[in-house]
Amino acid sequence: MKKTVVAMCLLFLASLLSGCSAEPSSESWCKDMKDKSQSEWTMQEAGTFTKHCVLGNYKE
C-alpha cells in the first residue's frame, strides 16, 4: 500500500513539472504562439507577441 501511494505521488509531481509552459516573450513561447490560432490569443498575449516576437526582443 505504501509503495502505491509513493508511486502516485511521484507521478503527480512529474506531471506538474512537465506541464510548465515557456516563459512569455521567450523564443520558444513565440514559436508556440505562432502555432496557436490568433483567435485564441488574449490582448496581453498579442501585445507581448508584438513587442518581443515581431521586433525580435526575446527574453533569455
Image (cartoon, rainbow, N blue to C red):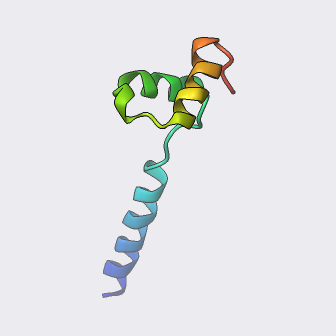
Q: Residue at x 49, y 53 (%)?
A: 17
Name the residue at the top extreme: 55
Does the rendering let one see residue 36? no
Quarter of the N terminus within the rendering:
bottom left
Q: Relative to residue 31, is residue 55 depicted above or below? A: above
Relative to 24, 20 lies left or right: left
Residue 45, given in percent of the width and then of the height, sits at: 53, 33
Name the residue at the bottom extreme: 1
Q: Relative to residue 28, is residue 23 depicted above or below? A: below
Q: Residue at x 46, y 63 (%)?
A: 13
Q: Relative to residue 47, is residue 12 depicted above or below? A: below
Does the rendering let one see residue 11? yes
Residue 23, given in percent of the width and then of the height, sits at: 59, 37
Name the image quarter holding residue 10: bottom left
Name the residue at the front extreme: 43
In front: 8, or 55?
55
Quarter of the C terminus within the rendering:
top right
Q: Residue at x 42, y 21 (%)?
A: 34
Residue 46, given in percent of the width and then of the height, sits at: 52, 28
Relative to 32, 27 lies left or right: right
Q: How many marks?
A: 0
